[in-house]
Image (cartoon, rainbow, N blue to C red):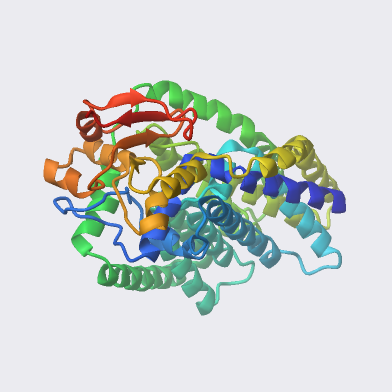
Amino acid sequence: MPVLWCLFAIEVLAGILKAPTFIWNEIRLSRSLALFQGFHLYPGEHELGPIIGTLHPPISHFLFLSAVAIHDPTTSIVAGSLLASIVVFSALGFALVRHAPPISGRWAITAGSFLFCGFLIVESEGTYNAAFSIHTDAAALAFATIACTFASSRNRMTTASLWMTAAACALAIASKQTIAPVVLAVSLYIAITEGGKRFARFLLACAVTGGSLLAFLLSILPARAFLFNTLVLAAHRPLKPDYRQILAGAYRMGRLEALPALLPLLFLAIWSWMRARPRREIRLFFAANPWIVFLMASAGIIPVSMKAIVTVGADVNHLGFVLYFLFVAAALAIQQYSTDANRAARLSSRIFLTTGILVSVAPGMILTVPASLRNLKTNASQTAHTYNLRHPGVAYFPYNPMTSLLTDGKLYDLDLALYDREIAGYPLTPQQLQSGLPRSFILVALPPGEGIQSKALQGLFADFVRITDPELPGWTIYRRAP
């Protein structure tokens, strides 16, 4: 067990150290930094000023405020990734500890179940992105996990648990809108296991907590602009041209990555149902197997996640939501049946636990840590910031908004945010575009592998001349024509 914990810690460290190499981590963390410096994040449809793309509610931006207090891009991004992983794995630990059976040796079983789920999260590309990236995903998954945990108590829900579940549901949706199907799964589980009266109370609690949270957000944010960004822009995103192939690829990937969790869930569910005779009641079956609420959450979020995967701007983290709840369900089921009175159930659970860890552990990640430490500050975010410190005001970085915030407290347009507006059918006017750009700049610098996406900036820089700069090796650089 100690060896496995060391391997897990190293894999987590390797994931955190890779965070600065992903340009989106800087982009998303910049929103928290902008909030920290007093900028408002939700510009209206016709409003002048910088646009950095805020399609989600602000809960996750508040979460990363502690990371942006560090005035160094690389260190700040590493801190943000560390914070995201702590939030995700703490929620997982909370679920396992709360459902741990009250017997001797339960902590060893809980630790093994945590490693089973933790290794699967790190191994799967989708859940890896959700756990280590600076994004809304960490907060949304954590709050949804807390909601499912409070809803699935083996005893009848107390009033406190009911309200905690409702509050966690509200916070989950306030972190990421597409987590809403998980709330529906929780509601259905409560209706089945607790009955109509308690279900009605839960709906009332959801209305009160959700309405209070929405009222609070609208009181501190420009209401019309907030709804424009989080509802209108988020909903009007076209499908990717090759969406059928993307959907097929996501299915193949998800099927393979889900197997270590699907097999134990299928076996244990069938075994538990067969053992329940002659009283095979759905309510009793669900109540006796609290992991079912996580399985329902995984199934419920599939349609939304598949739709998100095939829209422009989406990534594999949406598949990660489906897999995450599946992994947690499997870990809880294994934990539950590892202490079952039936010897066959105990043995089967421990075999599934061992197999899942063996197929998901990646000891080779140990080899990546020294190189990641040596090259920690070799990333686009740090390069842009170093250049901006040496040549203040010379270059505009459409993919690196953090450097201008750190050097002179200014915020400028993010190219991908302008592109989001264009594909949603709300392009900027010339006045809006100019209001979000630096007043005087000579160069436009794009990180290696990136290009201008928005038509607004493509037109603006059409007369710029392509150059190279030894201080920005591999970058795409354009110079204003004399």
- Estimate the x, y position of residue 415 in percent, counting from the top left: 31, 39
- Estimate the x, y position of residue 82 in percent, counting from the top left: 60, 55
The quadrant of the picture occupied by the C terminus is top left
188 over 470 or under it: above or below = below
Residue at the spot x=23%, y=55% of the render? 43
336 over 252 or under it: above or below = below
Q: Is residue 150 left or right of residue 24?
A: right
Q: Is residue 438 left or right of residue 284?
A: left
Q: Confirm whether residue 174 shows in the render.
A: no
Camera-nearest residue between 412 and 290:
412
- Estimate the x, y position of residue 34 in percent, counting from the top left: 36, 59
Q: Confirm whether residue 338 shows in the render.
A: yes
196 over 79 or under it: above or below = below
Q: Is residue 123 left or right of residue 199?
A: right
- Estimate the x, y position of residue 293 in percent, counting from the top left: 56, 55
Q: Is residue 452 left or right of residue 289?
A: left
Residue 239 location, quadrant: top left
